[in-house]
Image (cartoon, helix red, strand yellow):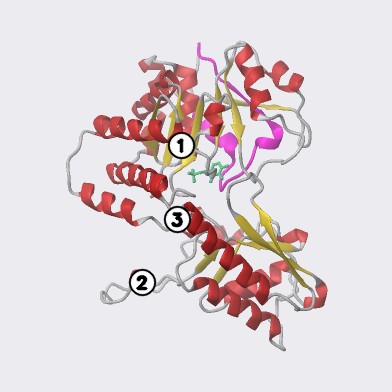
Amino acid sequence: MNTYSADRSNLPIRDRLGLRPIINVSGTMTTLGASIIVPEAIAAMAEIASQWVEMDDLQRAASTVIARLTGGEAGFITACCASGITMAIAGAMTGTNLLAIERLPDDTEGLKSEVVIQLGHIVNYGAPIDQSIRLAGAKTIPAGTVSVTQDYHVREAINERTAAGLYVVAHHTVQYGMLSLEEFCEICHATGVPVIVDAASEYDLRSFLARGADIVVYSGHKFLSGPTSGIVTGRKDLVRTAYLQNRGVARAMKVGKESIAGAMAALEAWERRDHAGIRRLEEAALNLWKDALQGIAGIGAEIIPDPTANPLDRLQVFVRPESRFTAAGLASALAAGSPPIIVRNHEVERGHFFLDPCNLHAGEAEIVAERLRAVLSAAERPANAMKEPRKESSGALRWPD
Ligand SMILES: *Cc1c(COP(=O)(O)O)cnc(C)c1O
């Protein structure tokens, strides 16, 4: 229940707005506010907020920064990665035909309007990726099966209507049996089909273009710790046609000057960031949590690398029945405490969850360690300690109540 009331102006903003002071150990989650924005980006956003600017010039400046950091020929900032995907696809469909841009998404007559994607890449990141394809007016052509894609699956899926191939790099995708980016690019490029890569939460800003992608799209608010935004980079002709969609479907995905300036500042801060120092802090948090879980019956803990090879480890916490918790039950016990601790729980039905150290404020790692021990050493278990994870969506329908 939100207890917003306007007469508490001397309180911190979360208290003022009636928001719970959560500790996020789940990663860069849209539902938890996406990122802790770096000070450089906050300053840039505040500074530009009260100024008039010529948006095409601001995006030109962004293009220069993006090109320098990614090795792309050009780039721009958009509302988020999902909108960048839609814009890149729409651009591959319309080219520079300004009327076609206004006709999307429902009138695609005369345009290439199919997008080939491996079936194991049709992920959901809060919304299904095929909807980002459909928003452009394109049709999703799945290639292969959920567990295997062969070269011929993609080759045979391509025809004269194919506008683009879409390749997803993420822990969300099937992690085996899929074509590599190089293989996917080779097949698409053999018939002149451009490849768009969704690299929303990948730290590596250069390798996907270097490995053959024509366009790569990142989130500005994930590892980059920028404001909610997306970054499109790659071949200049395709970046241009994607950018032109601001005159069409992307109007409904408008990015503001403050997000553009903030994302640029976050990119430049990324260049200067003390990556090794941050890694050491993350390792210290992981070891603290691992130690806190030592010797507790039914609980195992292992530090594991990120599935897509980002320079980030997480603590995998195994929850067995001797602990008198299920993984889902322990996750909800942590979320029910004060302050609520939100773990990375997308695999709880497999009997584990993860603790992600990449979004901590000073002192929070210690609170998480204490709470783990307190919850697990309490004589009493909460009522729902052994709850089974259920796909229960009715809560979404109750908002705003
Ligand atoms: C988060 C994510 C997205 C969506 O990114 P937004 O910037 O939030 O729109 C798309 N693809 C993948 C793989 C993601 O992880």
Part of the protein shown in magenta? 110-136
The answer for how far apart the CA atoms under marks 1 and 2 are is: 31 Å
The kind of residue on which mark 2 rests is: Tyr
Q: Residue at x 57, y 12 (%)?
A: 192
x and y, in percent, of residue 381 in the image: 71, 83
> Is disc 2 placed on a helix, strand or loop?
loop
Characterize the local packing of mark 2: few (<14), some (14-19) or many (20 or more) Cα atoms within 10 angstroms.
Answer: few
Q: Is residue 294 visible?
A: yes
Q: Nearer the viewer, mark 1 or mark 2?
A: 1
The residue where tag 3 is placed is 35
x and y, in percent, of residue 22 in the image: 49, 70
- Indicate yes or no: mark 3 CB to ligand 1 under 8 Å: no
- Indicate yes or no: mark 1 CB to ligand 1 under 8 Å: yes
The kind of residue on which mark 3 rests is: Ser
Occupied quadrant, residue 161 = top right
Vertical side of 238 occupied by 63: above or below: below
The residue where tag 1 is placed is 83
Q: Nearer the viewer, mark 3 or mark 2?
A: 3
Q: Along the line of sight, which residue is nearer the eye, 305 or 33? A: 305
The kind of residue on which mark 1 rests is: Ser
Q: Along the line of sight, which residue is nearer the eye, 155 or 206? A: 206
Tag shown at residue 32: none
The answer for how far apart the CA atoms under marks 3 and 2 are is: 23 Å
Vertical side of 84 occupied by 361: above or below: below
Q: Residue at x 56, y 48 (%)?
A: 126
